[in-house]
Amino acid sequence: MAVLGSLFVIVQRNPIYSVLALIGAFFGLSGLYVLLEAPFVAVVQIIIYAGAIMVLFLFVVMLLNVPREDAAEWDRAHPLYRPWPMRIGALLALVTIAQLGWALSRTPGIGGGVGEQTAGISDVGALGRVLFTDYMFAFELTSILIIVSMVGAVILARRQSE
Amino acid sequence: MNFALIPLSHFLILSAVLFTIGAAGVFLRRNLITLLLSVEIMLNAVNLTFVAFGRQFGTVDGQIIVFFVMTVAAAEAAVGLALVIALFRHRESLNPESFTSLKW
């Protein structure tokens, strides 16, 4: 479901359908997190990604009344006759999947079941304890990051006064 | 059905496929919003890898990194969409090829 949703995001020409498909992909991913015994991450995935970020995207898409991506003439041409940036992009995608597949096939010890040690990793309390002790500094840094990005977004999207 | 027997490699393969889809979207699409969505797909692929490895090694560190990645993704989406709005006001277009003022 996640793969289908993500593919739909890419092949879709209307941005609104892209955003809705990505929400579906995120729901699929959150199901996978449940399978991985990370229910808190799954819930946060739904709330933050599907809830907040995607609503932001959808809001911008509808606010701008985005035109459908206009099909250039190369889009209907044969794939081999497209302009060179597209060819390089497709080539890079193929290279990426080849590299990742090669790395996965060379890595030992990943074929076993994923569920041997399960003690405590699905415990929200343990998660919070580690988050507020070992990762305290990074946590505070993210708060600064959020403030900076919020101020930056407001300033960037502000209508220029005269 | 026992879900605990899904091998780690399956999650890694799925993550690789998702990452490639995102990268292909960044390279192939000509729409700023779709580009940002592709970046989100790539971030989610990496999140899946983190959670899978955290499960494999029995630590919560993977899930904590996922929270930070989500925070960064939210900040990136906010700033990126603000930039998109500002650019759209200038050019009435979302095609990245119409923003060539800095190109020589």
Image (cartoon, grey):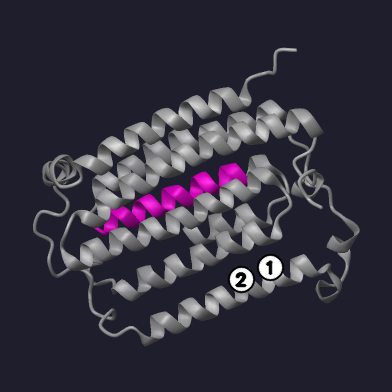
Residue range (magenta): A18-37
Mark 2 element type: helix
- Can I make out residue A1 in this image? no
Task: Give the quarter of the figure containing the N terminus of chain B.
Answer: bottom left
- Residue A85: x and y in percent read 76, 66
Q: Looking at the image, which residue is at 61% across and 52% down?
A: A9
- Residue A60: x and y in percent read 62, 31
Displayed quadrant of residue B91: top right
The chain ID associated with circle 1 is A
A157 left or right of B60 in image:
right
Along the line of sight, which residue is nearer the eye, B8 or A149? A149
Identity, as a three-letter code, of the amino acid under mark 2: Ala
Contact, mark 2 vs mark 1 (Cβ under 8 Å): yes
A29 left or right of B95 in image:
left
Q: Which mark is residue A89?
A: 1
Q: Which mark is residue A93?
A: 2
